[in-house]
Image (spheres, rainbow, N blue to C red):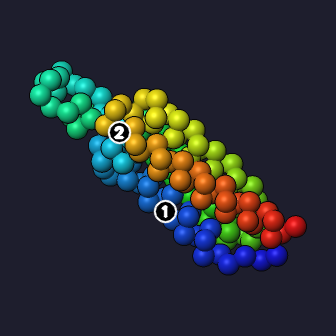
Amino acid sequence: MTFSPVSAYLLGSLSLAIGLNSFVRPCGECERFGLSLEPTPSTTSPQIEPSKIGAPSALIYLKGIREITYGLALIALQYYGQETAITIVAAILSLAGLGDGFMVWNYGGSTLKRKAFGHWMAWVVFAGWSWWRAVSMA
């Protein structure tokens, strides 16, 4: 079965945009993702909410690279018409959302803990999309 390429290109482009945001706005991406900024010597004031001060973790850049590679993979696989591969990659990518949700839930702190639900929603969307594609191909 041939699927509309719109979904793969859209999800791939979205992943690229999120990845690039990690480099353009690393502090904003930390908060969007659900991780607190790392404290710096000048930002240890107890009056300021910890998640709003400090410097981004180097891990946000690794996350950005991960998102960019996911996006490029989806776009390239769609460009070359690799329908089965897109389905498999989407199923595997869904696991990143599941794992990210658990990481944010455990390490995001009390103010950012709720961001885990966004990651779990991404897991549901990617897993559902890949399941639908797999069932449709059978």
Q: Secondary structure at mark 2?
A: helix
Q: Toward which corner of the image does residue 137 lie, by quadrant?
A: bottom right
| Residue drawn 65% across the image and 75% down it | 5
Residue hosting label 2: 112
Q: Toward which corner of the image does residue 44 lie, by quadrant?
A: top left
Number of numbered discs present? 2
* Residue 83, percent from left and from top: 76, 67
Residue 14 tag number: 1
Q: Between residues 104 and 30, which one lies in front from this camera angle? A: 104
Q: Between residues 33 and 116, which one lies in front from this camera angle? A: 116
In the picture, measured across the screen, residue 44 lies left or right of residue 89, that is: left
**Mark 2 belongs to which amino acid?**
Leu
In the picture, measured across the screen, residue 74 lies left or right of residue 135, that is: left
Quarter of the image where the C terminus is located: bottom right
Q: Secondary structure at mark 1?
A: helix
| Residue drawn 68% across the image and 69% down it | 78
* Residue 38, percent from left and from top: 30, 29
The earlier-in-sequence mark between 1 and 2 is: 1
Is residue 92 visible in the rendered image? The answer is: yes
**Mark 1 belongs to which amino acid?**
Leu
Q: Residues within 10 Å of mark 1 (few under 14, many from 20)?
A: some
